[in-house]
Amino acid sequence: MYSVLLFLIFAYLVYYHGAKSITTLTEVPRFIGNRLSKLWEIAHYGMRENRLLRAEKALLTILKIDEKNAAAYNRLGILYAKQREYRDAIDCFEIASSIEPSASSLHNLGLIYYETENYPKAATAFEQALRLEDNLAARHIAYAKVQEKLGNDKHMMHELEVAARIEPTAESYNLLLNAYEERGMKDETARVRKKLNRLAAASQPKRLVRPRRVVI
């Protein structure tokens, strides 16, 4: 009888502590998730209000909790780039790309390399970004600027033409127009100028036609 009672007590303790452990295990991720959400709010607010030190501390705390958080590294890279701390920005974007390659982190990396006049590495970063996402005119324009610095005029023209096809806006057409004009490409210049004129005409508000006044 004593042995049965002892067994029941032991079974109860095992069940109790096991249930408690499960409860604790489910509470820990929830607590961490809530804390990360709060830290992201602080980081976003800090970036928006230009309280960069506060944002940096929040992002670094996120990385202490989740050391493979590519989004935090990417945001931290943007923060360092704002402060012209380019070496730190490059490190952050490179780490973000190694953890989770994304077009945005690679594009940001290319922009920093371009800013620091490391054009070959900028070209490589933009190429990788375009392989992941090639439907944004801004990516092609950035790549075109690097190709211009590297002296690859043909490649530069191609990228500007692609950008104008993706987003036929005044900005993309003007960039293409200037490139054609600088290189004396008269036929191409005339063609793009016509497109710009049509675009300008389409964007102008239509004149209100008033009904004819009839005098009775």
Image: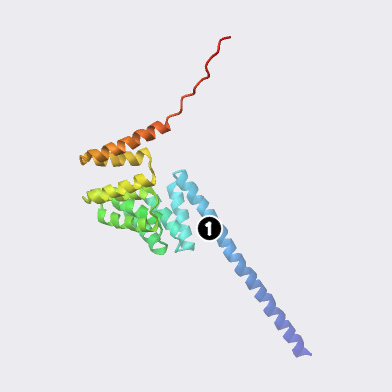
- The answer to whether any part of residue 84 appears in the image is no
Figure disc tally = 1
Image check: 203 left or right of 187?
Answer: right
Residue 84 in the image: state x and y as whole percent. 33, 48
Image check: 113 left or right of 56?
Answer: left
User: Residue 124's quadrant in the figure?
Assistant: bottom left
Q: Going 79% across and 90% down the picture, which residue do you hit?
A: 1
Q: Going 48% across and 51% down the picture, which residue do you hit?
A: 43
The residue wearing badge 1 is 36
Give the quadrant of the C terminus: top right
Q: Going 54% across and 14% down the picture, which residue do you hit?
A: 213
Q: Residue furthest top?
A: 216
Give above or below for 175 relative to 155. above
Secondary element at image label 1: helix
Residue 125 in the image: state x and y as whole percent. 32, 57
* Residue neighbourhood size for the residue with mark 1, other residues' Cα within 10 Å, grouped as few (<14), some (14–19), many (≥20): some
Give 135 or 91, whichever is nearer the viewer. Answer: 135
Residue 132 in the image: state x and y as whole percent. 39, 58
User: Residue 102's quadrant in the figure?
Assistant: bottom left
Residue type, mark 1 in image:
Leu
The colour scheme applied to this rendered structure is rainbow
Q: Residue furthest right?
A: 1
- The answer to whether any part of residue 184 appears in the image is yes
Give 167 or 212, whichever is nearer the viewer. Answer: 212
Give 135 or 55, whichever is nearer the viewer. Answer: 135
Q: Going 47% across and 58% down the picture, which residue do you hit?
A: 61
Give 10 or 191, whichever is nearer the viewer. Answer: 191
Residue 192 in the image: state x and y as whole percent. 31, 38
Image check: 155 left or right of 74?
Answer: left
